[in-house]
């Protein structure tokens, strides 16, 4: 059996087109959806990511402003700047790129963002809203994974979903979203005794560890849906996920590739959240 591929690039393109349409409708009402991105320091990966976010926004008609500050910026100055953006009605979304320099408390900084502008979905209020099923912003990566499941018409009700990884930005919110769709959810992590015994029961596996070959063919139930959140490099320096794609695709029913899977969806969902923030502010 060879798994069908869930094409993240194609789905992200479709979502960007929808965002562009809804953005045009808001603009026709005189509202320009706007995202403020804050980058502190010179982290090379962060510079690339923030550039992508600005370009993706421009492509869909959203206005994204990148504010860059030196690595030695005082935390108090950053908190003050966030306060100004919180109070600015022309700014709908605020994103502080992580990681922050070591002298800053990332939780304190994220929690300074007004929850209604927290388009990353990293604020404790956003996490709490997701947990209790109230409106709020969902973190972009697990949100993108849910859209991928939706795109194949997958009904999660009563299915066993196994999430590998328990981070606050992927594993935990992913589990909550799956639970919200009535899946039976297991969260596995570094202290899980027998990962294979868990994944072999899974109808859906989401691998979000950040390590190659966490999921191999012998660990997958035939026909399962496999979502690979990992972004690693192999020995040749090529991008690869957490899943042994070549092996697992022979067993799974559906699989997401890396690159071209969850990555583009994460980027697309930030646009969706930003647009949502503007729509909610205009409602
Ligand atoms: N650093 C790496 N990924 C992300 C992200 O999605 N949001 C923010 N704010 N920082 C990141």
Image (spheres, rainbow, N blue to C red):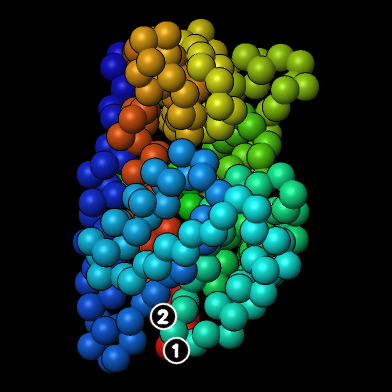
When asked about the image quadrant of residue 58, the answer is bottom left
From the top left corner, tell me how far across and down residue 93 is, in percent. Answer: 49, 71
Q: Indicate the quadrant containing the C terminus: top left, top right, bottom left or bottom right.
A: bottom left
Residue 125 is marked as none
- Asked if residue 184 is positioned above or below residue 173 in the image, the reply reads above
Secondary structure under tag 1 reads: loop
From the top left corner, tell me how far across and down residue 30 is, in percent. Answer: 29, 91
Residue at image mark 2: 279
Residue 283 is marked as 1
> Relative to residue 75, is residue 55 drawn left or right?
left
Give the residue drawn at x 66%, y 40%.
167
Give the residue drawn at x 74%, y 49%.
103
- Residue 252 seen in the current view: no
From the viewer's side, name the closer residue of 228 and 254: 228
Task: Please tell me how many numbered marks the rendered image carries.
Answer: 2
Give the residue drawn at x 36%, y 28%.
258
From the top left corner, tell me how far across and down residue 154 is, in percent. Answer: 40, 43
- Residue 280 seen in the current view: yes
On whether ligand 1 comes within 8 Å of the CB at mark 2, the answer is no
Q: Indicate the quadrant containing the N terminus: top left, top right, bottom left or bottom right.
A: top left
How far apart marks 1 and 2 lie (CA) works out to 6 Å
Secondary structure under tag 2 reads: helix
On whether ligand 1 comes within 8 Å of the CB at mark 1, the answer is no
> Relative to residue 131, is residue 237 drawn left or right?
left
Assess whether mark 2 and mark 1 are in contact (beta carbons under 8 angstroms): yes
Give the residue drawn at x 38%, y 23%.
239
- Asked if residue 228 is positioned above or below residue 167 in the image, the reply reads above
Is disc 1 surrounded by few (<14), some (14 to 19) or many (20+) residues within 10 Å?
few
């Amino acid at each position: 059996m060879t798994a069908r591929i869930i094409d993240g690039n194609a789905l992200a393109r479709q979502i960007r087109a929808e965002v562009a349409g809804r953005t045009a409708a808001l603009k026709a009402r005189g509202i320009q959806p706007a995202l403020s991105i804050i980058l502190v320091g010179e982290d090379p990966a962060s510079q690339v990511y923030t550039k992508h976010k600005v370009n993706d926004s421009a492509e869909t008609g959203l206005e994204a402003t990148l504010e860059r500050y030196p690595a030695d910026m005082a935390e108090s100055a950053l908190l003050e700047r966030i306060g100004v953006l919180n109070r600015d009605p022309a700014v709908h979304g605020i994103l502080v790129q992580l990681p922050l320099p070591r002298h800053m408390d990332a939780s304190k900084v994220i929690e300074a963002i007004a929850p209604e502008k927290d388009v990353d979905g990293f604020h404790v209020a956003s996490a709490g809203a997701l947990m209790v099923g109230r409106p709020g912003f969902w973190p972009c990566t697990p949100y993108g994974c849910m859209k991928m499941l939706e795109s194949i018409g997958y009904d999660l009700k009563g299915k066993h979903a196994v999430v590998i990884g328990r981070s606050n930005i992927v594993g935990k919110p992913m589990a909550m979203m799956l639970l919200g769709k009535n899946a039976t959810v297991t969260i596995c992590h570094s202290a899980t005794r027998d990962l294979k015994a868990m994944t072999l029961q899974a109808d859906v596996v989401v691998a979000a560890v950040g390590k190659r070959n966490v999921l191999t063919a012998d660990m997958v139930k035939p026909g399962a849906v496999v979502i690979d959140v990992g972004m690693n490099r192999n020995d040749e320096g090529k991008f690869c996920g957490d899943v042994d794609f070549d092996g697992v695709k022979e067993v799974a029913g559906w699989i997401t590739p890396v690159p071209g899977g969850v990555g583009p969806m994460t980027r697309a969902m930030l646009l969706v959240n930003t647009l949502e923030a503007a729509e909610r502010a205009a409602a």
